[in-house]
């Protein structure tokens, strides 16, 4: 992508949209962000943190509004659309399944349809998710694995994923997908477990919070840095042929171990005691319980996440994650400690 292009990013106020905007601006492209509601200081905090809020143009955009989708794309005339907008919380998809499906499923297809109908070669990136794998018995998850999602969020993302393939096969539309495993950063929403952990433990360290309460400590996830994924996503969109790519680190870590790493980065030595709902993390220095389990944070269904197979991305994109999990945890903890003391 040598010449300057117009990039439309849906969900630009979220974690991935913000990092992608920064990446595209650094490469000299024009960035238009689709947003619902006002671009006020509170909602643009990620763009402001990255120092790019003034460099981005905004258009009104809501995945639930066909008119707004059409108007945003027609007015911006993008070369590439990065579709990051979605109700992105698996937990929330259990309480809002219809809104999750309408936005992440039908909303995505409306974007593909616009790209097809305008016929001028718009490229679209669709953010798929490792949640589309669901309950499967393969040891490693690749682009060709069987998909068997069991959460409303996972089913929604699979619908959009398969529609992306249908648009490629049926109409030749240039739609690529990233089957994204978990990726985090200091810009991660505080409703996701990693940021909840780093933010809460920073507050515990500063004496502002008594304890961090979590759900399933045994859950394992493959956590990468969002910045690494943005690099790979950009490379995907530079390929002449649209395709699907699994992006991940290939390493699984439990929520309990992530807590231990964040605590260690804050110089808190944790001893784990008890089991199940009675499990606690005790600060060795003070003897106080600083981590406990609360059933309200358990999900009705929480599929295990087996290891990812990232060989296709390694081979065709010449990509590997550059951040270790320890680097990521350290950066998130530093950010939260600083934010809490400002
Ligand atoms: P995020 O921080 O939650 O950002 C999602 C963005 O979507 C937010 O800015 C939100 O806008 C916007 N949005 C939600 N509903 C919308 C609607 N109806 N119309 C227009 N915009 C809407 O998510 P992220 O972590 O950057 O993830 C980006 C994408 O990758 C999402 O599609 C997510 O499902 C997918 N994904 C993420 C991960 C991950 O680990 N981060 C893994 C796999 C897939 P507001 O600011 O107005 O709320
Ligand atoms: O949960 C467990 C929880 O909400 C991770 C999204 O970006 O990645 C993300 O979805 C694990 C789960 O992310 C708490 O049960 C324990 O097993 O951070 P999370 P997620 O559900 O994996 C996928 C790939 C996406 O596509 C999504 O968009 O942590 N867990 N205790 C908890 N989770 C939360 N949120 N809060 C807790 O207190």
Image (spheres, rainbow, N blue to C red):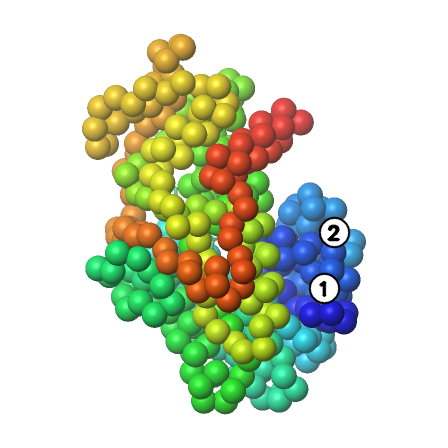
Rendered image: mark on residue 48: none
* Residue 167: % across, % down: 47, 83
Answer yes or no: do the residues labelled 2 and 1 have beta carbons within 8 Å?
yes
Q: Is residue 158 visible to us here? A: yes
Q: Residue at position x 44%, y 64% from top?
A: 312
Q: Residue at position x 38%, y 16% from top?
A: 283
Q: Nearer the viewer, residue 325 or 254?
A: 325
Q: Residue at position x 27%, y 66% from top?
A: 148
* Residue 6: % across, % down: 72, 71
Q: CA separation, marks 2 and 1?
A: 10 Å
Q: Is residue 65 above or below residue 133?
A: below
Q: Is residue 172 left or right of residue 213?
A: right
Disc 2 or 1, which lies upstream in sequence?
1
Q: Is residue 85 visible to us here? A: no
Rendered image: mark on residue 31: 1
* Residue 229: % across, % down: 54, 55
Q: Is residue 211 above or below residue 161?
A: above
Check the picture and name the quadrant holding the N terminus.
bottom right
Q: Place residue 123 in its image quadrant.
A: bottom right
Q: Is residue 193 left or right of residue 25?
A: left
The residue lying furthest to the top in this view is 286
Q: Which residue is mark 2?
A: 52
Check the picture and name the quadrant holding the C terminus.
top right
């Amino acid at each position: 992508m040598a010449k300057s292009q117009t990039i439309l990013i849906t969900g630009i106020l979220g974690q991935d949209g913000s990092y992608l905007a920064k990446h595209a601006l650094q490469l000299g492209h024009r960035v238009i962000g689709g947003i619902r509601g006002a671009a006020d200081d509170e909602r643009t905090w990620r763009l402001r943190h990255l120092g790019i809020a003034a460099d981005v143009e905004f258009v009104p955009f809501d995945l639930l509004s066909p008119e707004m989708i059409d108007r945003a794309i027609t007015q911006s005339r993008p070369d590439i659309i990065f579709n990051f907008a979605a109700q992105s919380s698996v937990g929330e998809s259990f309480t809002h399944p219809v809104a999750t499906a309408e936005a992440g499923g039908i909303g995505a297809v409306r974007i593909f349809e616009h790209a097809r109908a305008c016929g001028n070669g718009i490229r679209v990136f669709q953010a798929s998710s490792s949640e589309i794998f669901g309950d499967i018995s393969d040891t490693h998850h690749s682009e060709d694995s069987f998909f068997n999602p069991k959460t409303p969020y996972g089913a929604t993302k699979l619908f959009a994923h398969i529609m992306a393939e249908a648009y490629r096969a049926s109409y030749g539309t240039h739609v690529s997908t990233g089957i994204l495993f978990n990726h985090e950063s200091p810009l991660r929403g505080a409703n996701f477990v990693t940021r909840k952990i780093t933010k809460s433990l920073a507050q515990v360290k500063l004496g502002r919070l008594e304890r961090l309460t979590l759900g399933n400590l045994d859950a394992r996830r493959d956590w990468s840095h969002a910045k690494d994924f943005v690099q790979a996503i950009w490379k995907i969109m530079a390929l002449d042929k649209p395709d699907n790519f699994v992006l991940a680190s290939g390493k699984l870590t439990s929520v309990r171990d992530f807590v231990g790493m964040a605590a260690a980065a804050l110089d808190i030595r944790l001893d784990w005691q008890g089991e199940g709902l009675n499990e606690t993390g005790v600060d060795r220095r003070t003897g106080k319980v600083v981590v406990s389990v609360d059933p309200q944070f358990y999900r009705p269904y929480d599929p295990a996440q087996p290891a990812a197979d990232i060989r296709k991305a390694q081979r065709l994109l010449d990509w590997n994650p550059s951040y270790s999990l320890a680097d990521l945890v350290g950066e998130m903890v530093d950010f939260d400690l600083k934010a809490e003391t400002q």
